[in-house]
Structure formats: structure tokens, C-alpha cells
Amino acid sequence: AFERAQGGTIFLDEIGELPLELQTRLLRAVENRQIRRVGDGREIPLDIRILAATNRRLEEEVNRGTFRADLYYRLSVVQVALPPLRERPEDIELLARHFLAELGGAGSGIRLSDAQLADLKRQAWPGNVRELRNYLRRLALGEPALQALAAIGTPASPTLTAPAAAAPADAIDLAIPFREHKARATEQFERHYLEVLMRESGGNISKAARIAQTDRTYLSRMLDKYGLKGE
């Protein structure tokens, strides 16, 4: 992958999931700007830009000892925080039209009305862009196709019940920092999502990972974090 990226950019998605032993190898490539093929003693110089993404707070992972501090500081030259989809509703129309065009014939006959777009912008989209894309895919399939899938025992999508309502304003303790309040709310959502996900997948972690479109190892760690079990 590094060789193919020569003269351009390599994108390392979910860098926070990289095991420690592989972090050491990546650090060597980033630090020395060169790589060596397996079984080859020749060093290959690199001329690339590295772009890494993660949904974890890597500073906290460094403190826990699950992410190398030296690799973090070498990668963290410029940080860009991507807000969740619910905080940038102005992007939803552009994304929706892009995904419908991406579907080709299946999506070409769909025209979103102003009312539909307004409804999309009101949604929370806890699954962010992936959830929006999957919603539009289901829309493109149409009801007859979904009924046919259900008839052969293939679920169109898991049904997620709404999470518990947020606490009223007068229940917010302003003595607690905003970040801690946000972390508690995130944990509440994560636990609820995982409980529903494992119920829909019958406790099968591999199936749950496919439904959630996430890495199986990462999902296992999340289940361990909240004391939930899977097969």
C-alpha cells in the first residue's frame, strides 16, 4: 500500500485499532520515510503524505498504553475534527444526491422533495454518513424488494428503538464539565446501541459487526467495555 501511494497520499482508516506490534512497524516507516518488503533487504524510500483517521480519542489511548505516544506525535501534525452529521445538516442534501447518483439505475428514479430533505435534516443520524447511505439504499430498493428479501429470511435492516430521552435542562449539573457530560451521554448511547445490535444479531459478533459496518475486533472491545457478551 505504501508503494502504491508513492508520490501521493496514503489513507490509514481507524488508526486507533492498529495493534501495538504493528504500530511499531508503522512508526519505523513514518520516522525513516522508508519501507522494506518482507524477505527483501533493500530499503525503499517513500515520498508520500500520510492521512490517518480514527473515532477514538488517541490522547486517552496513549495514557492507557494502547497507542504509542511517539507514533501519535509523529502523525498528529495537523488535526481536523469532523463533526457528526447531525451537526452539519447543510451537508445532507449534497450527500443524499451523491449517494443516489452512486446507486445508478436504482437511485436514478428517486427525487427527494423539499419536505423529504427537511425531514432528513431533522434526523439525529447516530450512524452518521453510513446510516444515511444505507437509508437511501433501502429507499432505492423500494417496498416490493424489501418484502421479497423478508420473505426469504433476509432482514432489510435492524430495527433500533429510540434511546432514552435526554435529561431536562434543569437536570444538568453545571458543576460537571461539558466534556464529562458529553462522555456520559456518549456512553449511554453506545451501551443502548450495542444492546439492540446484539439482540438483533442473536449474540453473533461477526453478524453484528457486519450490521454495524465496523471491525469485529473493535466491536469485541466495545462489548467488553460495557460488560456485554457475544458469541
Image: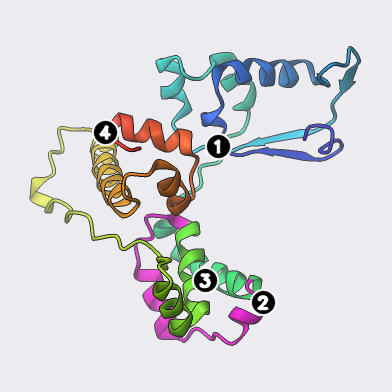
Q: Sequence order check: which comes first, mark 1 or mark 2?
A: 1
Disc 3 from disc 4: Cα separation: 31 Å
Numbered disc 2: secondary structure: loop
Is 211 on the left-hand or right-hand side of 71?
A: left
How far across and down, in percent of the image, does residue 22 sit? Answer: 62, 20
Residue 78 among magenta residues: no
| Residue type at numbered disc 3 | Arg
Numbered disc 4: secondary structure: loop
Residue 114 among magenta residues: yes
Q: Sequence order check: which comes first, mark 3 or mark 4?
A: 3
The residue mark sitting in front, 1 or 4, is 4
Disc 1 from disc 4: Cα separation: 21 Å
Q: Which mark is residue 14?
A: 1
| Residue type at numbered disc 2 | Gly
Question: Which part of the image, by quadrant, shows the C terminus?
Answer: top left
Numbered disc 3: secondary structure: helix
| Residue type at numbered disc 4 | Tyr
Disc 1 from disc 2: Cα separation: 29 Å
Relative to 103, say whether 162 is above or below: above
User: Mark 3 highlights which residue?
Assistant: 137
Q: Nearer the viewer, residue 217 or 3?
A: 217
Q: Farthest residue in the front direction? A: 152
Q: Say if mark 1 contacts mark 2, CB within 8 Å.
A: no
